[in-house]
Image: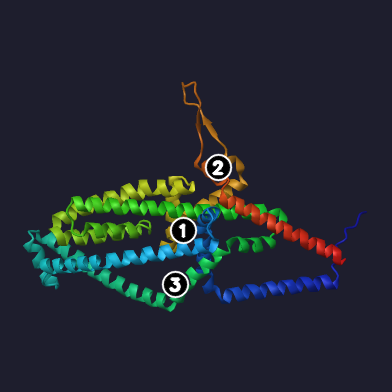
Amino acid sequence: MKTARVPIPDWPTVKRSAARLVGILILVYLCYLVRQIWLPLSLAFLLAMILDPIVDRMESRKWSRVWASAFIFGSFLLITGGLAVLVYPFAAEQVSTLQRGFEKYFPDPSHAGLFTSFRHMGLSPSLAHAGVAGVEDAKASVQHSSSWLTDFGMSLASNAIWIVIVPIVAFYALRDFHLILAKALLLVPARRRDLVQTAVGEITGIFGKYLRGLLIVSLLNGVATAVLLSVLRVPGALLLGIVAGLLYSMPYIGALLTLVITAAVAFVGGGPNMMLLAVGLSVILHQIIFDQIVSPRILGGQVGLHPILSIIALLVGNLLLGIIGMILAVPIAACIQIAVLAMIPKLSQEIKIAPPGDGSTDTVSSLEQETKEEHQKAGTTDEMHTAVNMAVTAIEEASTKEQKTDL
């Protein structure tokens, strides 16, 4: 009869394991205590990861990494500040014009005064009551939004230090990106390093392409909005186009806010008929053409995600994290897709379809395969990652030799 023996660890082993467990628990508890710092720091390192390929290409053109990083951040600050200085006077003038136009149509903001103003426009009593209800609801929403914005502003002011710290951390993380990566790889087992480096490269590529796609979609939306409202002769069409482009970075929500602003400006500028026409065409432009066709195809195509999956990701992101979830939904979904393809490689293989009655064979490559091939192309960043891996291996070999010498 065979007996099974259960190995009993000796006391020093038990003591080391217990000390390690206690150390891990203390570290987790400390991380929990300072949990508010992880999101801003994560954003800073994510920004550095996204900008790293650009700096790598600039380095290949004989730029110093420090000067390349400084040039990127400095250019962003100068462009943002310059646009703000140029747009502010025009925006202030348009807001004043809008206010004067509203006072012209509605000199008495009371309930009875609004009803009288709508009746003077030739609306029936039922439509006038509906108009009064709409204006009052809009005023209530504006007041609610103002209180929300006040609370948000106070919260932002209390965390204003992060507005300064995040760019600074991102700059230093970008400057020393490969050194930080090399230090981190030293903590990873050798057999897992290729996987970790590949994951870093994939995530960097996905978020970079997503931001590029979001910039393209926002620019197209702003131009299309400005052209449409200019054709309709809506006042401030150029400013509304700029606002629409900026707001469209918030999927769906941005388009809805643009629609409300457009309705108000069109009403003040041309009355109910212009408002109805502008709102109707804006709904077609934003909610149908951009939200359902242009945005899923461009954003999903940039990260290799099918348009259906892009829409599902946006809906799930909205349910889980609201606006922030919608902004991050597509690139996170693309990262999940890459992980699934890594675990199930057959999903990334070519599919050959022969149409009935056709002797030829059409090859349909999935978007997932195209993304994989694109990411596998050798580039400057891949060469830098190879150099980092070689440096880490050399450090480990030198450390191993020192240990053998000491023995």
Asked if disc 2 and disc 3 are in contact, CB closer than 8 Å, the reply is: no
Residue that numbered label 1 is attached to:
328
- Amino acid type, callout 3: Ile
Relative depth, front residue between 197 and 401: 401
In this image, 373 relative to 215: left or right?
Answer: right
Q: Is residue 15 above or below residue 128?
A: below
383 up-or-down from 358: above or below: below
Calculate the distance from the C-alpha at mark 2 to the C-alpha at mark 3: 37 Å
| Comes first in the chain, label 2 or label 3 | 3
What is the number of callouts on the image? 3
Q: Earlier in the sequence, mark 3 or mark 1?
A: 3
Residue 241 in picture, x, y percent from top left: 27, 56
Residue at 53 percent across and 64 percent down: it is 66
* Residue 250 shown left or right of residue 170 in the figure: left
Alpha-carbon neighbours of circle 3 within 10 Å: few (<14), some, or many (≥20)? few
Q: Secondary structure at mark 1?
A: helix
Q: Amino acid at mark 2?
A: Glu
- For mark 2, does the 10 Å Cα neighbourhood hold few (<14), some (14 to 19), or many (20 or more) residues? few
Q: Residue 311 placed where, x, y %? A: 42, 50
The residue at 49%/42% (across/down) is: 367
Instruction: State the image quarter where residue 235 is shown.
Output: bottom left
Question: Can you say which quadrant of the picture contains the C terminus?
Answer: bottom right
> Which of disc 2 and disc 1 is earlier in sequence?
1
Q: At which x and y percent is residue 238?
A: 24, 57
Q: Which residue is mark 2?
A: 373
Q: Are marks 3 and 1 in contact (CB under 8 Å)?
A: no
Going by the image, does 8 lie left or right of 381?
right
Question: What label sits on residue 163 in the rendered view?
Answer: 3
Residue under the point 53% across and 73% down: 37
On screen, residue 182 versus residue 295, left or right, reads: right
**Residue 25, image x, y percentages:** 67, 73
